Image (tube, rainbow, N blue to C red):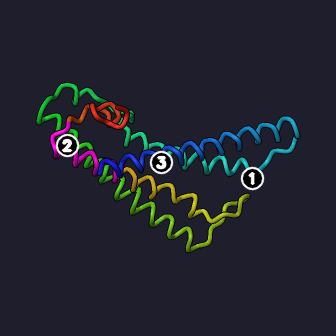
Amino acid sequence: MHALKIRIDRVLGMLIAAVFAVLVACVVWQVVSRYVLGTPSTVTDEMARFLFMWVGLVGAAYTLGQRRHLAIDVLPLMLSGRNAQLLAALVMLLIAGFAAIVMVYGGYQLVEKTLATGQLSPALRIPMGYVYGAIPFSGAMIVFYCSFFLVGLARGETPDTPAGDAPGGPLD
């Protein structure tokens, strides 16, 4: 399962980098077309909004997978041993539950309904279901990462060590 996580990390990292590069190019072109050419591009404006959604949602899943997400750690720092592991497991279960119900199930319903109605984006004329696809996709990645960490906790791994910082981890 660890090898699968490493592959998913690499694919998500490359996807985020590629989407972010296109996002930056869109924003630069938007600025050039608006202030230099005097005719703002509606296509790059809309594309930048959609790419920002994708990079934000997929980036959140990737950040969770790297254990670099923002967290309030007052309670975990007060606990140790078995209690810290139980709290970490509870947190992972809550995150996975939210991602599974709201993001994967609800996001899939949104994508399905949007594709069924044929809603298109105004400038790019692409189905909005593809844009909303970022929600169930990132939700599925979050569920995967939570499952990976829960398996690690069941094996007795410490919840406070980021995945890349553990001895023998992918950065060693």
Residue 140 percent location from the top left of the image: 39, 56
In the current view of this chain or complex, which residue is farthest to the left? 82
Question: Within the magenta stretch, is there residue 154?
Answer: yes
Q: Which residue corresponds to mark 1?
A: 43
List x then y, in percent, for residue 123: 73, 58
Residues drawn in magenta: 144-157
Query: For the residue carrying disc 2, how many other residues have a C-alpha within 10 Å: few (<14), some (14-19), or many (20+)?
Result: some
Q: Is residue 53 left or right of residue 1?
A: right
Location of the C terminus by quadrant is: top left
Q: Amino acid at mark 1?
A: Val
Q: Secondary structure at mark 1?
A: helix
How far apart are labels 1 and 3 at the CA level? 26 Å
Count of number-bearing discs:
3
**Horizontal side, residue 16 vs residue 62: left or right:** right
- Mark 3 residue type: Leu
Mark 3 = which residue?
Answer: 12
Q: Is residue 109 above or below residue 29?
A: below
Residue 129 to residue 92: above or below: below
Q: Mark 1 packing: few (<14 Cα in 10 Å), some, or many (20+)? A: some
Out of 166 and 109, give the one closest to the viewer. 166
| Secondary structure type for disc 2 | helix
In primary-sequence order, the first of circles 1 and 2 is: 1
Q: Main secondary structure of the magenta part?
A: helix
- Label ID, residue 153: 2
Mark 1 to mark 2 CA distance (whole Å): 46 Å
Amino acid type, residue under disc 2 in the picture: Leu
**Which mark is first along the chain, 3 or 1?**
3
- Mark 3 to mark 2 CA distance (whole Å): 23 Å
Whether label 1 touches label 2, CB < 8 Å = no
Residue drawn 83% across and 35% down? 35
Q: Nearer the viewer, residue 16 or 93?
A: 16
Residue visible at 49% across and 64% down?
110
